[in-house]
C-alpha cells in the first residue's frame, strides 16, 4: 500500500513497508500483485468478518467452502494450535480464533497482514499470531508444533513440494490437515488452454461467471493438477478426498441464486467414481492425518 489508513497503528504501517528478504522471482511477482490488490481493497479493513459459516445450523454440503468448515468444526479446533498459511485479509484466521483455536497465520504480503491484523483486533481476536513470510520457508515456526493446518486457496500460489515439506515439519505427529483448493486435471487444462477456448469461449464465460468484474488471478498462479495434488496426498494418512465443481465455476457462477444448480452439480460429482471425479473436478476438498 503506498498510503496507509491513518486509523492503523504505527507499527502496522511500518511492517507493511517491509519486503521479506531472499524471495524467488515467482514470490516477488506474487508479492507485487498482492500488494497492489491490498491497496485497491483497503476498504476491506472496515468490513466485519462474516460468521454464518461457523454459526448457521443450516449447512451447505454442496459448497466446497462450507464443507471445508464442516470438517474443521468436526475436528474440534478449540484449544488446538492451528496454522493457516496465506492469511489474505484474515477471514479464516479470525473465524478459527472465534472457534477457540490458538491461531498462527502468515502471508507473503505485509500489506495483507496489516489489514488482517487490524480486522482481527476490531473483531476482538487480537491474540492471533500474524507473521510475514513465504509458505516455502516457515522459519518462524519450530518443528512438531501445530495440531491442525488449514489450506484455503493457497497452494496454487506456491511451490507445493517445498510448502508441504514445511507443513509436515511444523506439525505434531498425528496432527490434522484440512484444505479446499482450486484444481484441474491436466487433460481438461489442455482443453481449457486450447486456442478456441482461450480466445473465444473463456472470455465470454469469464464475464458471465465474474459478473464482468476482473477475476482475482495472479500472473503466476495455476490450479493445481493431479501430479501436484499427489504431493499433497502423500503427506496425508487416512485421506478423505472429495472433488467439487463439474460445471460450477466453469459454466455458471458460485452465487446463492445458482444454489439449485450447485446442488445438482455436487450430486453428480458425489456419485462419480473417484478416478472420474478427479478428471472432472475444479475443486478438491481434502483432509487427513499428517504422514509423519
Image (tube, rainbow, N blue to C red):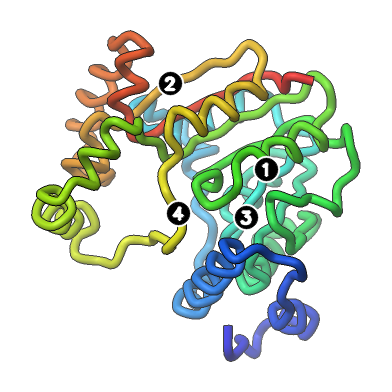
Image position of 269 with respect to 228: above or below: above
Alpha-carbon span between mark 2 and mark 1: 22 Å
Other-residue count near label 3 (Cα within 10 Å), few / some / many at <14 / 14–19 / ≥20: many
Residue 83 position within the rendered picture, expressed as x and y whole percent measured from the top left: 73, 42
Label 3 vs 4, first from the N-terminus: 3
Residue 180 position within the rendered picture, expressed as x and y whole percent measured from the top left: 49, 35
Q: Secondary structure at mark 3?
A: loop
Are circles 2 and 3 on residues that touch, CB within 8 Å?
no
| Relative to 140, 110 lies left or right | left
Q: Secondary structure at mark 4?
A: loop
Q: Residue at x 47, y 43 (%)?
A: 52
Q: Which residue is mark 4?
A: 221
Q: Which residue is mark 1?
A: 163
Are circles 3 and 4 on residues that touch, CB within 8 Å?
no
Q: Which residue is mark 3?
A: 87
Are circles 2 and 1 on residues that touch, CB within 8 Å?
no
| Relative to 238, 101 lies left or right | right
Which-is-in-front pick, marks 2 and 1?
1
Disc ID at residue 242? 2
Alpha-carbon span between mark 3 and mark 4: 17 Å
Q: Nearer the viewer, residue 23 or 285?
A: 23
Alpha-carbon span between mark 4 and mark 1: 15 Å
Q: Residue at x 26, y 18 (%)?
A: 267
Residue 253 position within the rendered picture, expressed as x and y whole percent measured from the top left: 23, 46
Label 4 vs 1, first from the N-terminus: 1
Amino acid at each position: 500500500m503506498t498510503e496507509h489508513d491513518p486509523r492503523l497503528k504505527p507499527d502496522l504501517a511500518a511492517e507493511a513497508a517491509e519486503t521479506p528478504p531472499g524471495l524467488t522471482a515467482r514470490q516477488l511477482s506474487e508479492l507485487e500483485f498482492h500488494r497492489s490488490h491490498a491497496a485497491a481493497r483497503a476498504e476491506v479493513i472496515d468490513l466485519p468478518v462474516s460468521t454464518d459459516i461457523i454459526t448457521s445450523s443450516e449447512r451447505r454440503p454442496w459448497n466446497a467452502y462450507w464443507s471445508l468448515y464442516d470438517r474443521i468444526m468436526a475436528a474440534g479446533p478449540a484449544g488446538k494450535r492451528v496454522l493457516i498459511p496465506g492469511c489474505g485479509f484474515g477471514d479464516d484466521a479470525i473465524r478459527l480464533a472465534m472457534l477457540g483455536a490458538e491461531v498462527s497465520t502468515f502471508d507473503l504480503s505485509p500489506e495483507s497482514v496489516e489489514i488482517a491484523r487490524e480486522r482481527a483486533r476490531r473483531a476482538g481476536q487480537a491474540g492471533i499470531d500474524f507473521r510475514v513470510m513465504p509458505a516455502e520457508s516457515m522459519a518462524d515456526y519450530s518443528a512438531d508444533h501445530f495440531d491442525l493446518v488449514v489450506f484455503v486457496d493457497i497452494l496454487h500460489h506456491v511451490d507445493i513440494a517445498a510448502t508441504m515439506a514445511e507443513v509436515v515439519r511444523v506439525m505434531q505427529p498425528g496432527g490434522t490437515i484440512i484444505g479446499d483448493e482450486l484444481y484441474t486435471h491436466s487433460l481438461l487444462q489442455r482443453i481449457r488452454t486450447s486456442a478456441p477456448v482461450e480466445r473465444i469461449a473463456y472470455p465470454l464465460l469469464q464475464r458471465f461467471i465474474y459478473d464482468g468484474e476482473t477475476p482475482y488471478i495472479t500472473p503466476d498462479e495455476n490450479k493445481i493438477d493431479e501430479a501436484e495434488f499427489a504431493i499433497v496426498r502423500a503427506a496425508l494418512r487416512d485421506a478423505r478426498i472429495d472433488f467439487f465443481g463439474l460445471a460450477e465455476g466453469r459454466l455458471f457462477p458460485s452465487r446463492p441464486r445458482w444454489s439449485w444448480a450447485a446442488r445438482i452439480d455436487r450430486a453428480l460429482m458425489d456419485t462419480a467414481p473417484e478416478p472420474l471425479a478427479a478428471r472432472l473436478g475444479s475443486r478438491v476438498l481434502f483432509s487427513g492425518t499428517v504422514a509423519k
